[in-house]
Image (cartoon, rainbow, N blue to C red):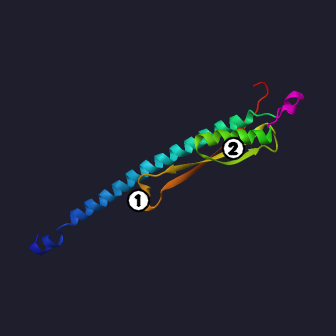
Amino acid sequence: MSPTLRRLQRGTISIFIAGALLAMIAAIGLGVDGSRALQGFLRASGEAQEAARTGADVLDVASVYGGGTPTVDVGGACTAAAAYIQQTGDDLVACTPSAVDGAQLTVTVSAEVPTVFLGLFGVNSFTMTASATAAAIEGT
């Protein structure tokens, strides 16, 4: 190899190492922040399920004593679900009693998840949203 060609190739391995290191840091960052986003979604999903169950337990008294199918008390159920979500520190996006079957309540919750590595690129948090439906069952 001639001395001129050797001089031209000097430092090329450093550029490769720097690029590989940057790619590895980006992959690790996506892995960490991706797992945090998944964890936030699972947290929002669990909280939505519990809030829906809490709200579905609030029944319309007239429907229970009338001998018919129990129905969810619309105002009380959403108030109970919102009180549960308020204790968790997340946000209640929607609370919807079922129009078809009055014994069901659907709750949608959003959770804010802060990032670790993506904050370096301007993405400071993710908002994960999950929904769950619970039904009031006769005899419970």
11 to 112, vertically: above or below: below
Question: What residue lies at 53% left-to-right and 45% top-to-bottom?
Answer: 40
Left or right of residue 88: residue 71: right
Q: Could you say which disc has been placed on residue 107 in the image?
A: 2
| Image coordinates for residue 138, horizontal then vertical, percent | 79, 27
Q: Classify mark 2: residues with Cα within 10 Å, few (<14), some (14-19) or many (20+).
A: many
Residue at x-position 67% and y-position 40%: 83
Asked which quadrant contains residue 62, the reply is top right
Q: In this view, does 38 lie to the left or right of 22?
A: right
Amino acid residing under circle 1: Leu
State the residue lying farthest toward the right. 66
Residue 52 image offset from top left, x and y in percent: 69, 38
Dot 2 or dot 1: first in sequence order is: 2
Please name the residue shown 71% across and 38% down the image.
Answer: 80
Q: Is the magenta stretch mostly helix, strand or loop?
A: loop
Task: Examine the image and state in which quarter residue 64 appears.
Answer: top right
Q: Which amino acid does label 2 sit on?
A: Val
17 or 2: nearer the viewer: 17
User: Is residue 67 inside the magenta stretch?
Assistant: yes
SS state under label 2? strand
113 above or below 2?
Answer: above
Residue pointed to by mark 1: 120
Q: How many marks?
A: 2
Q: Distance between the residues labelled 2 and 1?
A: 34 Å
Looking at the image, the residue that sits furthest to the top is 139
Local crowd size for mark 1, using a 10 Å CA cut-off: few (<14), some (14–19), many (≥20): few
* Stretch in magenta: 60-72
